[in-house]
Image: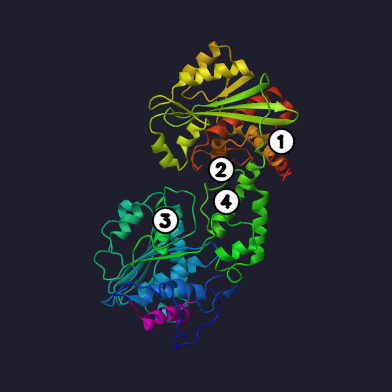
Amino acid sequence: MKPKRNTSGSPKPRKRVSGDSGAPAGYWYDEAAAERAVGFFADCLTHTKGEWAGQPLALSDWQADRIIRPLFGWKRADGTRRYRTAFIMIPRKAGKSTLAAGIGLYLLFADNEPGAEIYSAAADREQAGIVFDMAKQMVAASPMLAKRAEAFKRSIVVNATASSYKVLSSDAYTKHGLSAHGIIFDEVHAQPNRELWDVLTTSVGARRQPLTVAITTAGYDRHSLCFELYDHACKVRDGVIDDPSFLPVIFEAAEDDDWKDPATWRKAHPGLGVSVKEEFLADECVKAQHLPSFENTFRRLYLNQWTEQESRWVSLDTWDACAGALPDLEGRECWAGLDLASTTDIAALALVFPIDNRLFVRPLFWVPEEGIRRRSERDRVPYDAWVRDGYIEATEGDVIDYDVIRRRINELGEQYRIHDIGIDRWNATQISTQLSGDGFTLTGFGQGFASMSGPMKELERRLLARELAHGANPVLRWMAANVSATTDAAGNVKPDKSKSSGRIDGIVATIMAIGRYQAAEPGLRIDSIDQVLAFV
């Protein structure tokens, strides 16, 4: 937002606004109403934080033309508001909280709704309170608004119109019985489910022109409420869906845009150069290039790109740089990791071959034959094509046949010298006993920090140093892209299945295989992330 005041009492010259052309029949643009809303920000509100604190809250052009003018200027034939829902996806540091607070206050003070109920909502009370507390500070700083309202810890009340602005969080079961006129839903990507959204948006039925504003950065969970809204917004924007009551406002970099290019930053971030300096993004970008775990954070928060998971373990550029072909491995010694995970999803075996200071990884995967199409739709990956091309073996039935895995491991034992198989013994007692009886050495491998940290850091180090080749296996690549890592206070790291965006069994199996190799070669242990970063 620009710290400049509009000319008080003089509407700005008519500008083209989002949705100006091709408006559905029966809708019209009320310029006076649009300029009244824009003027409210500059005339009644001030910035509350930072270098502009105390200055009039004049809107930037993109805020006025893409959001405020369309929201409050477009009308239905009966004079009520056209748009009833707005999905606003803008990057961090674009002034979204300030804008959201201003919209909430306009609905409270200036929307001519008797007994208006305005709610700031979010996944948790702390997040919901960010917008509300900013609104409360704006009221306190405005003599015009302060004399009309009483501010309390969790509410702002306008007694003259019996209207209120309150803060809510995700314990939605307590929210029935509301009659919302305005809903400011902050950081929708963090919402764990759609319960609060449904409770609030179904509470507007008694209102003539309710408005729900969903404002967020991009997320990573493509099965979430936020992605559902984002998908709908894109389809409305692109004309695929006809929904004249829904206003999509999306600032984002395309999936194939170079996230390291300043031109991409300028395309995605409307506040660049105003609310955030380009130098700041440049520093954050350098950080993301040196710390792969920060890459997704940078892309998601500053470029509004949907990522595969919250924080990426390694970049796909790093992974693809190690896609070297596997040599002839016949008769070579190797160490293995076996992750059986769930009998209904996917099982993985990874063989790690040390050759001339490099590690070569050969992965194998199994899935139940029944339900492959359903799994493809759920995970959005071509299981059927991978089975056809030999990257995955499908076993008969609706659960993985462990006998098939056992036979395959015995065949591999004839091809290679398998020294040790690391295995998560959960749900694997029978096959462990059977393979031990077949003559293999099996070692229980814990899934906590103590067991996983060393080999996971070693895997990362070798990827960064290009001392590993995986043969460009597409299934393992998909799993590498899914991995989200978690770190404890001591700097230990492990894969986090709960935060990962999809199956990671092949990577877990690879880590276990490297762990068994490290146990055979103690000098290969790695204990510090500094050792990893030394190879960047």
Q: Which residue is mark 3?
A: 231
Q: Which residue is mark 1?
A: 467
Nearest the viewer among 382 and 360 is 382
Q: In the rendered view, does 1 fall on the left or right side of 39?
A: right
**Callout 3 touching callout 1 (CB < 8 Å):** no
Q: CA distance from mark 3 to mark 2?
A: 22 Å
Nearest the viewer among 168 and 90 is 90
Asked if 66 appears above or below 228 in the picture, the reply is below
Amino acid bearing label 3: Asp
Residue 42 is marked as none
- Residue 464 place in picture, x, y as percent: 69, 41
Amino acid bearing label 2: Ala
Q: Tell me if mark 3 has few (under 14), some (14-19) or many (20+) residues whose alpha carbon lies within 10 angstroms of its own.
A: few
- Residue 385 place in picture, x, y as percent: 48, 36
Query: Mark 1: which secondary structure?
Result: loop
Tag nearer the camera, 4 or 3 = 3
Q: Tell me if mark 1 has few (under 14), some (14-19) or many (20+) residues whose alpha carbon lies within 10 angstroms of its own.
A: some
Asked if 57 appears above or below 9 in the picture, the reply is above
Of labels 4 and 2, earlier in sequence is 4
Residue placed at 43% from the left, 79% from the top? 40
Of labels 3 and 2, earlier in sequence is 3
**Callout 3 touching callout 2 (CB < 8 Å):** no
Q: Which residue is mark 4?
A: 296
Q: CA distance from mark 1 to mark 4?
A: 24 Å
